[in-house]
Amino acid sequence: MTDSPVLALAKDLISRQSITPEDAGCQEVMIKRLEALGFQVEVMVFEDTTNFWARRGTEAPLFAFAGHTDVVPAGPIEQWHTQPFEPTVIDGHLHGRGAADMKSSLACMVVAVERFVEENPDHKGSIGFLITSDEEGPFINGTVRVVDTLMQRGEHIDMCIVGEPSSTHFTGDVIKNGRRGSITGDLIVLGTQGHVAYPHLATNPVHEAFPALAELANTKWDEGNEFFPPTSFQIPNIHAGTGASNVIPGEMDVQFNLRYSTELSSDDIMRRIHSTLDSYGLNYELNWTLNGDPFLTDKGALLDAVVAAVEDVNHKTPELLTTGGTSDGRFIARMGGEVIELGPVNATIHKVNECVNIAELEKLTDMYQKTLEKLLTK
């Protein structure tokens, strides 16, 4: 039996070993399909990362699909039922690295636009594609650089669907209409190294820092709000000492991360943490990495259209959530437009034997196409 257009394209993309930041020709496949529809395509290469921006039309509103062609490494090959870069269908599921995160979404986007343009060649507004190959990596030379480039020339995306695997039990049961912010602190607490038998001749940074860290861990940062849970503070990494049991360390390294709601800003967080550390008289160095500010789309034409499209296909109203990690939506949201995430079930992402339900890919394609119809038909 011949594969459907969506399945055939998803297989083609999965077969390409595009471990971040490699693209392995995925974008070239997409570009050829989009150029055939009249899209103007710009390939933007920044350092080790290949991106492209494609646009069909010049008028507002500008609706865009966004996503990434890169994938995480396959992990232990011996634990896979199939070869990770040989797309295989088993019991109605497509297996392979990137099947859920997020090459199948890309296939659905392209096929949805092909169908929409065939039926609506003179659609209103414009359609865009913002595709990167570094979402799974350091996110330095990908979407953020493309967004900066577009904004510098006054080009702003009004509405965007990011194809991240947002769903929990079946495609479209959840729409991510925002994400929490993320900020990481790399803290070095300085002391004086010495012999444990002579503590009066040393300053133990572990002892000095623990009360302050305990206060930060127990701080109630905010109450959250209707869309976001309360802000969380977590310490994922901590290190001190030489490995010897008789040496007081000279410094302690602590890494912490906060996932925060729209009730706080990164400046609020940094100010409060510095104030706490200073109140304990610590000798410290602290470097910050802002991974992304929170964003929220709580109303608007895009959210209305996507919810209606999902209801048309599933005959159920999707749940709106902001849970999970960060995504490239945080960079696109800087343009001031509406941003939501809609994609496949996320149960197997980044795992061995990653897979996606093929029938639900057809449904996702319909959801994308119906969204376009609701937003861009005259």
Image (cartoon, grey):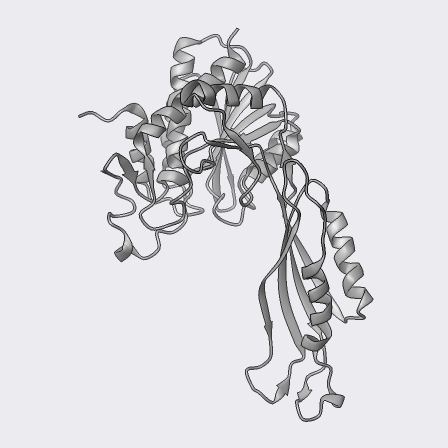
Q: Please state if 343 lies on the left or on the right of 17 as rendered.
A: right
**Does the image show residue 35?**
no
Where does residue 227 sit, x and y in percent of width and height?
Answer: 63, 36
State whether residue 259 is above or below residue 76.
Answer: above
Q: Foreground: 152 or 247?
A: 247
**For the N terminus, which image quadrant?**
top left
Where does residue 299 sit, x and y in percent of width and height?
Answer: 63, 24
Q: Which residue extends farthest bottom?
A: 197
State whether residue 190 is above or below residue 319.
Answer: below
**Does the image show residue 232?**
yes
Where does residue 166 sit, x and y in percent of width and height?
Answer: 47, 36
Where does residue 323 sit, x and y in percent of width and height?
Answer: 55, 42
State whether residue 211 is above or below residue 193.
Answer: above
Q: Please state if 6 lies on the left or on the right of 66 as rendered.
A: left
- Identified at 39% across, 11% down, the residue is 118
- Identified at 61% across, 30% down, the residue is 150
For residue 206, which quarter of the picture?
bottom right
For residue 369, which quarter of the picture?
top left
- Identified at 76% across, 71% down, the residue is 283
Q: Which residue extends farthest front?
A: 316
